Image (tube, rainbow, N blue to C red):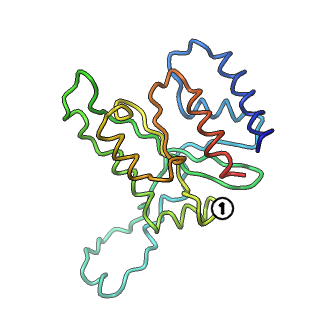
Amino acid sequence: MGSSANRLRKKWQDYSGKNAGKAEYDFYKTFQSFFTDTEFEIISKPKEFNKIYIDVKLSKKELSEIYKPKTTITKHGISPDYAIKNTETKKTIYIEVKRQDGWVKGKPRSAGRGNAHERSCKFFTPGLQKILREKGNLGENVLPFWTVFQGDITRDPCRVREITLWYDSYNAHYFFWRNSKFADPLIEHFIEKIMPLLR
């Protein structure tokens, strides 16, 4: 991985140098530019999972106890924010970018009451992990998702502890992007932690 990581680091240095002074980096546009002329691509709102719940088989007993709408359900699934795909290995990881308020200096503790970080935990469920791994061509021991947190949640003493505990040893799979004026730490995290999973 050394030479390809160094090549991408050099590419990022050139890109960030040309964009110095930019007010704020956008996750999608940053990676879209970064991946130009590489084996990687970023996909916005991948659609391959927007029907995954429709075909879930239920027992006759279960079916007899739930509501049966007269209309046909044509869309019921999940839509990750992004996917990053290695076009050579055909491996893909799915990304959620969660921006949330938080309890920080000058704000009351109640400022951290949002639950976007909790909703992102659906990707830890066995059923979704199985489907994401299969579609992403990832191994059994790889978490098939990467969550990037933005906003005050990244400095909230309670929420940071919760997320750190939830992810435990899977610390490669989340990132606190505390200052979106600086994308270098985000890119470095991708190169060091996520890119090897897509090789």
| 101 horizontally vs 51: left or right | left
Q: Residue 94 placed where, x, y %?
A: 55, 51
Rendering quarter of residue 72: bottom left
Residue placed at 31% from the left, 36% from the top?
Answer: 157
Q: Position of residue 180 (x, y in %)?
A: 49, 25
Residue drawn at x 63%, y 16% is: 19
> What residue is rendered at 70% in x and 35% in y?
35
The image quarter containing residue 40 is top right
Label 1 element class: loop
- Residue 40 shown left or right of residue 83 in the figure: right
Residue 15 lies, in percent from the top left, at 69, 22
**Picture quadrant where residue 3 is located:** top right
Reading the image, the residue beneath label 1 is 137
Residue 29 in the image: above or below residue 83: above
149 relative position to 27: left or right: left
Q: Is residue 119 above or below residue 22?
A: below
Amino acid type of disc 1?
Asn
Query: x, y percentage for residue 179?
Result: 46, 25
